Image (cartoon, rainbow, N blue to C red):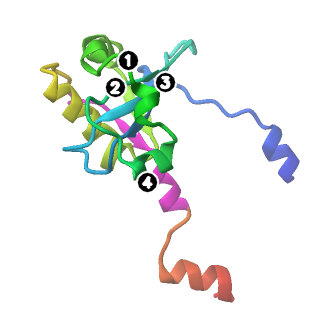
Amino acid sequence: MTDSDANNTERSLELSRPLAVLDVQSTGLDSSNARLVKLSVLKVDPDGSEYAKSVLVNPEIPIPPGATQVHGISDLDVMGKPVFKAYARALAEHLAGCDLAGFGIERFGLPLLLAEFERNGVEFSTDGVAVVDAMTVFHRLEPRNLNSAYARFVGG
């Protein structure tokens, strides 16, 4: 198979449950203290239908300049936007019964989302939910360690 054949090969994922792909932007890196400033969700049902939504969220605390440098969202961007509580119940219902995926979701995105649900008194359980972290998959395929670096750059 040539590279062009690989690029033209359609790949599909057979789902037995809905899959929600999450992307979160926040005020910081500590999921217990950070607040959401942007949440994007792509939900794919087993029949292939897709639902995408992205919202800016007023975190009710200042967005540090370092966070703005990362995601480009400032206090002015979220001024007058709804707070997370305005979305929390509907989001929990939208995600109920879904498996979850995202980049860095295991260490950051999901803990942040769970903390936001808890802060707002909305129950959301991940019991029985499969979580696929694209960052974990990438790091397994492209290890970042001395042996990998040696093999790639020195030829071992």
For this rendering, which residue is in front, 104 or 88? 88
Residue 89 part of the magenta-drawn span: no
Q: Position of residue 93 (x, y in %)?
A: 29, 12
Q: Nearer the viewer, mark 2 or mark 3?
A: 2
Q: Write the start and end of the magenta stretch as one range.
A: 125-141
Res 58 label: 2
Q: Amino acid at mark 4?
A: Thr
Callout 2: helix, strand or loop?
Answer: loop
Residue 133 part of the magenta-drawn span: yes
Please say if 142 is above or below 17.
below
User: Along the horizontal axis of the image, is 55 left or right of 91?
Assistant: right
Q: Amino acid at mark 1?
A: Gly
Q: Position of residue 94 (x, y in %)?
A: 35, 13
Q: Residue at x 87, y 47 (%)?
A: 4
Could you tell which of marks 4 and 2 lies nearer the N-terminus?
A: 2
Report which residue position mark 3 lands on: 15
Report which residue position mark 4 lands on: 136
Label 3 to label 1: alpha-carbon separation: 38 Å
Callout 1: helix, strand or loop?
Answer: loop
Q: Nearer the viewer, mark 2 or mark 1?
A: 1
Report which residue position mark 1 lands on: 80
Q: Amino acid at mark 2?
A: Asn
Label 2 to label 3: alpha-carbon separation: 34 Å
Could you tell which of marks 2 and 1 lies nearer the N-terminus?
A: 2
Q: Residues within 10 Å of mark 2 (few under 14, many from 20)?
A: many
Q: Residues within 10 Å of mark 4 (few under 14, many from 20)?
A: some
